[in-house]
Image: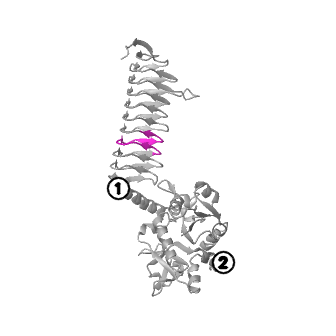
Amino acid sequence: MSIQTVIMAAGQGTRMRSSTPKVLHPILGKPMLWYSLRAARTISNDLPVVVIGHQSEHVRQAVAGQARFAVQEQQLGTAHAVEQTRALLEGEAEIVLVTSADMPLISAETLRSLAEAQQAHAGPMTILVTVSESPRGFGRVVRDEQGFVRAIVEEADATPEELAIRLLNVGVYAFDAAWLWEALPRVPLSPKGEYYITALVHLAVQDGLDVQALTLTDPDETIGVNTRVHLAEAAAAMQHRINTRWMLAGVTLLDPATTYIEPEVTIGQDTVVWPNTHLRGETTIGRECELGPNTYVLDTTIGDRCKVFSSVLEHALLEDEVDIGPFGHLRKGAHLAQGVHMGNFGEVKNSYLGPGSKMGHFSYLGDATLGANVNVGAGTITCNYDGVHKNPTSIGDNAFIGSDTMLVAPLTLGENARTGAGAVVTKNVPPNSLAVGMPARVIKKFEKS
């Protein structure tokens, strides 16, 4: 079964009251359109075709490489939007699926079931429907005694009897491709001056063909986004879906309602996530970790058995058994090797801390390389910026940096080097040496151990 997917994303979204195109408003860190693309890509070997119109270049740039594009210069309705894809898709597949970018919760499983339902019957189209007491403006689906669809009546045009119908058109369709391309030019112009995809039901019935309905079982999938209220509703449903998946996979979320996990995050079994934790971007977390509360992690890799309390981690790497916080901050390029401890109110940027090293509270390490088992006392700062350049600091294995030390880069401290509390180190310290004072001077050398 060959399938092509069309995602409609050309509308202005005026009810969002935003200069940002509606389909680019984020849900858990990703544009709405991203979710539709992800679902579509799982059911076809070909890139989905996105119909763009309003602020088309912004939409094109936001998902470049993830889709092909057809431009709807004038927004003349949903059938007109699908017609714009003819040059790309006619003759390319047996089935054409049509969905919408403002329905981000439609799953790949639903799209696959819809395509399979269409393939299994002889009629030209299958529509996705739901049964609900909250119509949300959806069209009403009228069926005959055999259960085939006879009409879709828009809410504004429905009689009181039709408004009482609780079988609703979700707005996702599967078509026999050959019939679709033949029928689209026959769609009549509506009184509002647009060409509606729902008119294809009437054409199929007129042709003596059966239109079937596939009933959606998950009501969350029907959430469409037209306002910021709907956006929040969709985000909450997506949050619940993602969090449920991780809990079923063996991750403990102590308060799922205040835990925010973006869709590309991965988490190992037996990790515990405390409330108000945000896991974002392409973050990877190992097994048996403990994160939070009040922790923010972005595009960071965390190994096994790490503990991160009330801290911010951005573009960082933690090996196994690292302990951070509370109130630590790892900035881009921070790499903490196995067993590193980082105390409260510490900050690390573009630096490597070797295995077993310890960094005291209220310290800052920038552009630094530390060996194994280095002890960095509280209040230590690498003075890495001279007003023009960022300069490196290198600290050898087993060094001991006294509290409140200022390390004025560029600087090298050898293995087993020591500094006294409050030292301002402006010159290199040889291995096995003690430097004290302002500016620091070497006053003692130790025997190599």
Q: Secondary structure at mark 1?
A: helix
Q: Residues within 10 Å of mark 2 (few under 14, many from 20)?
A: few
Does the segment drawn in magenta span residue 153?
Answer: no
Q: Which residues are magenta?
A: 298-318
* Depicted 209 relative to depicted 371: above or below: below
Residue identifier under label 2: 185
- Gap between marks 1 and 2 measured at Cα: 49 Å
* Depicted 292 relative to depicted 400: above or below: below
Percent from the top left, x then y, of residue 5? Answer: 56, 66
Q: Is residue 22 left or right of residue 147?
A: right
Q: Nearer the viewer, residue 79 or 380?
A: 79
Q: How many marks?
A: 2
Residue 392 seen in the current view: yes
Q: Residues within 10 Å of mark 1 (few under 14, many from 20)?
A: some
Q: Residue at x 53, y 63 (%)?
A: 40
First along the sequence among labels 1 and 2: 2
Q: Secondary structure at mark 2?
A: helix
Q: Nearer the viewer, residue 112 or 422?
A: 112
Percent from the top left, x then y, of residue 301? Answer: 44, 43
Q: Residue at x 43, y 24 (%)?
A: 396
Q: In which quadrant will I find the N terminus? A: bottom right
Percent from the top left, x then y, of residue 206? Answer: 58, 86
Q: In which quadrant will I find the C terminus? A: top left
Q: Amino acid at mark 2?
A: Pro
Q: Amino acid at mark 1?
A: Met
Q: Is residue 47 left or right of residue 380?
A: right
Question: Where on the picture, by quarter, is residue 402?
Answer: top left
Disc ID at residue 145: none
Q: Nearer the viewer, residue 420 or 373?
A: 373
Q: How is the image coloured?
A: one colour
Percent from the top left, x then y, of residue 430? Answer: 45, 16
Residue identifier under label 1: 247
